[in-house]
Image (tube, rainbow, N blue to C red):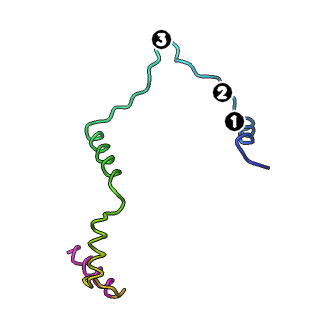
């Protein structure tokens, strides 16, 4: 069986019940559009999220600085030195 838009439509027409179109509720004379209203903290959070999404994934200035320090021999190049330094920094931050 080939599954595509047409075959899915045929399968859905067999499985899903038929429904009648839905109109306005009885006694309602005016249909209005749905609206969403955010609170002030919600608007601030949305604005912050927009700013965060506009930031680059990497900070080129930090990458260039680390690269320069690595080439100058200021950063550890062996795995054991790097692991030791990471552990030292992690334990120092926790205390």
Q: Residue drawn at (43%, 26%), measured in percent from left and top?
A: 34
Residue 42 against residue 70 in the figure, above or below: above
What is the secondary structure assignment of the residue under circle 2? loop
Rendered image quadrant of residue 46: top left
Q: Is residue 88 magenta?
A: yes
Q: x, y percentage for residue 10? A: 75, 38
Circle 3 residue: 29
Which residue range is magenta in the image? 81-95
Q: Percent position (x, y) of residue 9?
A: 71, 38
Instruction: Return the disc, 2 or 3, that comes first in the chain's sequence.
Output: 2
Q: Magenta region's main secondary structure?
A: helix
Circle 3 Cα neighbour tier, 10 Å, few/some/many (<14 / 14–19 / ≥20): few
On the image, numbered disc 2 is attached to which residue?
Answer: 19
- In this rendering, is residue 18 above or below 53? above
The residue at the point 52 percent across, 17 percent down is 25
Mark 3 or mark 1: which comes first in sequence?
A: 1
**Against 2, is 40 above or below?**
above
CA–CA distance in space, label 2 to label 3? 23 Å
- Which residue is more in the foreground, 59 or 49? 59
Residue tagged 1? 16
In space, the residues marked 3 and 1 are separated at their CA atoms by 31 Å
Q: Is residue 1 left or right of residue 81?
A: right
Decide: is 2 above or below 21.
Answer: below
Is residue 43 part of the magenta span, yes or no? no
Residue 64 sits in quarter = bottom left
Q: Residue furthest right?
A: 1
Which quarter of the rendering shows the C terminus?
bottom left
């Amino acid at each position: 069986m080939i599954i595509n838009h047409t075959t899915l439509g045929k399968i859905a027409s067999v499985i899903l019940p038929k429904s009648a179109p839905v109109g306005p509720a009885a006694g309602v004379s005016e249909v209005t559009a749905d609206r969403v209203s955010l609170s002030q903290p919600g608007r601030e959070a949305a604005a912050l999220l927009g700013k965060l999404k506009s930031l680059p994934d990497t900070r080129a200035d930090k990458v260039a600085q680390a690269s320069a320090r690595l080439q100058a021999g200021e950063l550890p190049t062996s795995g054991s030195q790097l692991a030791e330094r990471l552990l030292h920094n992690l334990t120092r931050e926790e205390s």
